């Protein structure tokens, strides 16, 4: 995997920088420091360990459960930084965000989820979302339509249309989920549990 003897810890006063990346999405989760001890623990356990300026040796997720399972560790060309590709059991950021750099698509989904939740119980004429909440049959019909359109676009190999239909399907699925008392947070919990 990673040869610790080849790393240049001296350049960083005993530390190397670690860029931690989601192995599935490619999204950068966080940047931290590691000393030799942290990397030895990482290699031994298969889960990321870092060196915190305030806590010293730090096993990511030891308290929260949001451990990062190592997929690969790769040193950069100067041997003073490491790219850690991981599968996370939960958010990487102490704020609860998926990454320390904002959630990107997750932020947009979160905003959509909040907008949908805010329209539940509104007058059916107030918005399309409120209309869907008021009409169970319309809600379910739209999921079927959007699913069919998504499948067709995928079968046709039409990336642009498939992307648009996926967005429509996600929106309608979230409305239906909220209508039965669910939310995006519940979906995230299920996905985190499955990732473990």
Image (cartoon, grey):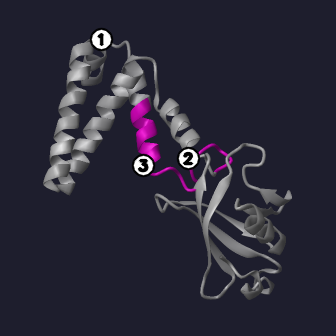
Q: Secondary structure at mark 1?
A: loop
* Residue topped by disc 2: 195
**Badge 1 or badge 2: first in the primary sequence:** 1
Please provide percent x and percent y for residue 81.
66, 78
* Residue topped by disc 3: 105
Instruction: Look at the image and give the residue range highlighted in magenta.
Output: 93-113
**Badge 3 or badge 1: first in the primary sequence:** 3
Tell me if I can see residue 125 in this picture. Answer: no
Q: Residues within 10 Å of mark 3 (few under 14, many from 20)?
A: few
Residue 142 against residue 77 in the figure, above or below: above
Tell me if I can see residue 23 in this picture. Answer: yes
Q: Residues within 10 Å of mark 1 (few under 14, many from 20)?
A: few
Real-space CA distance between mark 1 and mark 2, rounded to the nearest whole angstrom: 39 Å
Magenta segment: does it hold 126? no
Please provide percent x and percent y for residue 180.
41, 17
Real-space CA distance between mark 3 and mark 2, rounded to the nearest whole angstrom: 18 Å
**Which quadrant holds residue 194?**
top right
Pick the residue in front: 57 or 13: 57
Pick the residue in front: 187 or 111: 187
Q: Nearer the viewer, mark 1 or mark 2?
A: 2
As drawn, the label of residue 74 is none
* Residue topped by disc 1: 123
Residue 149 against residue 58 in the figure, above or below: above
Magenta segment: does it hold 98? yes
């Amino acid at each position: 995997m990673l040869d610790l003897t080849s790393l240049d810890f001296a350049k960083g006063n005993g530390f190397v920088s670690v860029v931690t990346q989601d192995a599935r999405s490619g999204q950068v989760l966080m940047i931290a420091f590691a000393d030799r001890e942290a990397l030895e623990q990482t290699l031994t356990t298969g889960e990321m360990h870092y060196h915190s300026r305030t806590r010293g040796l730090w096993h990511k997720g030891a308290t929260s459960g949001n451990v990062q399972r190592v997929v690969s560790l790769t040193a950069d060309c100067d041997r003073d930084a490491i790219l850690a590709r991981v599968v996370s059991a939960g958010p990487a950021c102490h704020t609860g965000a998926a990454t320390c750099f904002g959630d990107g698509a997750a932020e947009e989904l979160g905003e959509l989820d909040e907008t949908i939740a805010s329209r539940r119980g509104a007058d059916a004429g107030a918005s399309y979302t409120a209309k869907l909440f008021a009409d169970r049959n319309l809600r379910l019909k739209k999921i079927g339509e959007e699913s069919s359109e998504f499948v067709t676009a995928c079968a046709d190999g039409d990336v642009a249309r498939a992307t648009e239909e996926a967005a429509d399907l996600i929106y309608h699925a979230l409305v239906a989920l909220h209508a039965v008392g669910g939310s995006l947070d519940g979906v995230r919990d299920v996905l985190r549990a499955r990732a473990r």
